[in-house]
């Protein structure tokens, strides 16, 4: 279990450090970073699949149009999430982006209620209500919805739902998604090259290398996460997920000096309270389930 915590915790910590990587590419337009990320992620994943001799799933997947269609939709959601996140980081909105990943578990509750008709427990209702108060407070204080956080949470939450019900694992799923995105990314980059607008072609060696490593930077945390998720309970994984937005928040405030006054803090406190209720309720419910099962087995 310790190994699982190390793997999953490392994945979330690396995801939390993503702003540092994207900040080094601040002179490259967000769309170009996204297109390069699609391209080099696929090439890196092909290498990983070849090394692990893990190609058997492809012949099965290509014969299932419904599966391909589902992953086409998840690929669109993933690319939208990536684009908004990259844009947010390079336009001074790391704190707003961290908000999105803080509230993702709560958005998942709403998605389950609306799309899957899941009945919410009292603790879940309370956590959603507290999060709504936090979002409303931030909206009142800034004069607009915290759209970056909401878009990131909605796209990632819906993406998570699609992947949860899919037949492929993390590595195979991301490989299929990037393969579906590859023609779009490659074609657009070729067009930009012909127009003399491709930053990869015109940039320095340093920028070229940074764009090239977007593949492993995308895939390695995912592989660590997949390895960790197989070794630890979902409750533990649920608690570890807060590492990523916390690291992002700290980077935004202390390294990049983004504004974080007492009004914004108050909104975040309401959301953290919601997450506390959500986590505590989940842990208590899991404890009771284990206790009941132990009694029934004795």
Image (tube, rainbow, N blue to C red):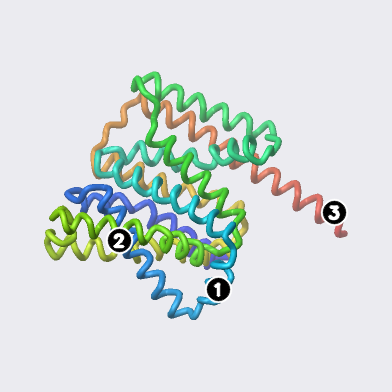
Marker disc for residue 186: 2
> From mark 3 to mark 2, how far is it between C-alphas?
58 Å
Q: Tell me if label 1 and label 3 are in contact, CB under 8 Å.
A: no
Identify the residue at horizontal 26%, vertical 36% (top origin). 258
- In the rendered image, residue 157, in percent from the top left (x then y), is placed at 52, 44
Q: Quadrant of the image for the C terminus?
A: bottom right
- Quarter where residue 278 is shown: top right
Helix, strand or loop under label 1? helix
Name the one closer to the observer, 250 or 112. Answer: 112
Residue drawn at 23 percent across, 61 percent down? 210
Mark-to-mark CA distance, 1 and 2: 24 Å
Q: Which residue is mark 1?
A: 59
Of the residues tagged 3 and 2, which is closer to the observer?
2
Residue 73 at least partly seen: yes
| Residue 231 appears in the rendering | no
Would you say 252 lies left or right of 11 here?
Answer: left
Image location (x, y in percent) of residue 105: 54, 42
Rendered residue at 69%/39% (across/down): 118
Rate crowding at label 2 as few (under 14), some (14 to 19) or many (20 or more) other CA atoms within 10 Å: some
Q: Quadrant of residue 294?
A: bottom right
Left or right position of 199 against 185: left
* Secondary structure at numbered mark 3: helix
Residue at image point 34% right, 22% down = 142
Residue 252 vs residue 183, the one in the foreground: 183
Q: In which quarter of the view is residue 123 placed? A: top right
Q: Secondary structure at mark 2?
A: helix
User: Which residue is labeled 3 in the image?
Assistant: 295
How far across and down, in percent of the image, does residue 22 sit?
27, 52
């Amino acid at each position: 279990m310790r190994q699982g915590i190390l793997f999953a915790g490392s994945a979330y910590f690396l995801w939390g450090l993503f702003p540092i990587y994207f900040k080094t590419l601040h002179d490259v337009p967000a769309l170009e970073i996204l297109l390069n990320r699609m391209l080099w992620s696929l090439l890196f994943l092909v290498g990983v699949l070849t090394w692990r001799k893990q190609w058997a799933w492809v012949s099965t997947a290509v014969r299932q149009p419904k599966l391909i269609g589902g992953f086409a939709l998840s690929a669109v959601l993933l690319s939208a999430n990536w684009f908004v996140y990259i844009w947010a980081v390079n336009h001074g909105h790391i704190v707003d982006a961290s908000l999105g990943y803080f509230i993702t578990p709560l958005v998942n509750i709403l998605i389950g209620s609306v799309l899957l008709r899941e009945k919410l427990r009292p603790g879940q209702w309370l956590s959603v209500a507290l999060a709504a108060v936090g979002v409303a407070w931030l909206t009142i204080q800034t004069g607009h919805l915290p759209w970056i956080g909401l878009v990131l949470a909605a796209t990632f939450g819906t993406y998570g739902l699609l992947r949860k019900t899919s037949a492929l694992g993390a590595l195979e799923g991301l490989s299929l998604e990037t393969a579906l995105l590859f023609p779009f990314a490659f074609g657009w980059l070729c067009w930009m090259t012909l127009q003399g607008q491709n930053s990869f072609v015109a940039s320095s060696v340093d920028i070229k290398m940074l764009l090239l490593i977007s593949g492993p930077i995308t895939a390695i945390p995912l592989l660590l996460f997949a390895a960790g998720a197989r070794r630890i309970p979902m409750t533990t994984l649920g608690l570890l997920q807060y590492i990523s937005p916390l690291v992002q928040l700290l980077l935004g405030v202390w390294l990049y000096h983004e504004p974080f006054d007492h009004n914004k803090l108050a909104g975040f406190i309401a959301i953290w309270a919601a997450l506390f209720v959500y986590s505590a309720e989940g842990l208590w419910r899991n404890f009771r389930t284990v206790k009941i099962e132990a009694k029934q087995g004795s």
